[in-house]
Image (tube, rainbow, N blue to C red):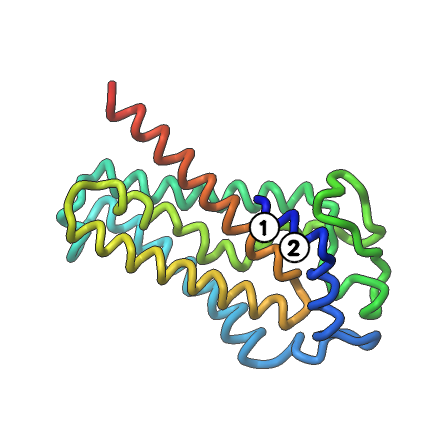
Amino acid sequence: MALTWLWDAAGLDLWVMTQLGSPQGFALQHTWWLEKVLHQGGRQLAWAVLAGLALMVWRPLGGFRRLPRQLRTEMLLGVLLALVLISTAKHFSLTSCPWDLQQFGGVATYRSHWAWGVPDGGAGKCFPGGHASAALAFLAVPLSLLAVHDAGQRRAGWLALAAVLLAGLVLGAAQTLRGAHYPSHTLWTGLMCWSAALLNHWLWHLRRKR
């Protein structure tokens, strides 16, 4: 949270976007590998992984067979909770995308992300990063694995954590390069998804203690 404040206070979001954009917009916005592969393809892959995780709850395969069904359910619900949180936040967000700013040919005015409830004159609904959440929502999976006592499952948890964070950074960076999101949106998305994962894990922990 402190890092998001420092980043915002330094004005780094707007500085980064001015390096990538111009009054004519963002040159990389419709680049094939950013728009088709990482944006559209990444979203489709995330839905496929989510469907696979749901299948593992009822028909576990491979390493998932060694996990209790309750733990597999915790993973799935943690991912869904994060997705709902991000989607809800975006729905009520007054923050517009960088490509909507006046500096880049749009109509919006830049506002600090800490200026909650202040409209910027644009369409809004661009905070936090929905695309980055396609990966970062899965933070609930490694968290569940890291909390168990089995050393092998914890190792799998660390590998899963690294994979989720890397995927989130790649998807978030792709959207930043396209002008769709500020760099800090990926950080905010990660914090919110991690918070959702922690809340979900805590609730399941309370349930198991009954």
Calculate the distance from the C-alpha at mark 1 to the C-alpha at mark 2: 6 Å
Badge 1 amino acid: Leu
Q: Residue 77: x, y in percent?
A: 37, 40
Q: Residue 103: x, y in percent?
A: 84, 67
Quadrant, the C terminus = top left
Labels 1 and 2 touching (C-beta < 8 A) = yes
Judged from the image, the secondary structure of the residue bearing numbered disc 2 is: helix
9 relative to 145 in the view: left or right? right
User: Camera-side residue: 68 or 162?
Assistant: 162
Residue at 73% over, 66% down: 15
Residue at 75% over, 71% down: 18
Residue on which disc 1 sits: 3
109 relative to 7 in the view: left or right? right
Up/down of 205 relative to 57, above or below? above
Residue 7 marker: 2
52 relative to 81 in the view: left or right? left
The 10 Å Cα crowd at callout 1, few under 14, some 14 to 19, many 20 or more, is few
Residue at 51% over, 71% down: 38
The 10 Å Cα crowd at callout 2, few under 14, some 14 to 19, many 20 or more, is few
Q: Residue 33: x, y in percent?
A: 54, 79
User: Camera-side residue: 123 or 147?
Assistant: 147
Q: Residue 148: x, y in percent?
A: 21, 41
Residue at 43% over, 64% down: 167
Badge 2 amino acid: Trp
Quadrant, the N terminus = top right
User: Camera-side residue: 92 or 136?
Assistant: 136
- Residue farthest along the top direction in this orientation: 210
Judged from the image, the secondary structure of the residue bearing numbered disc 1 is: helix
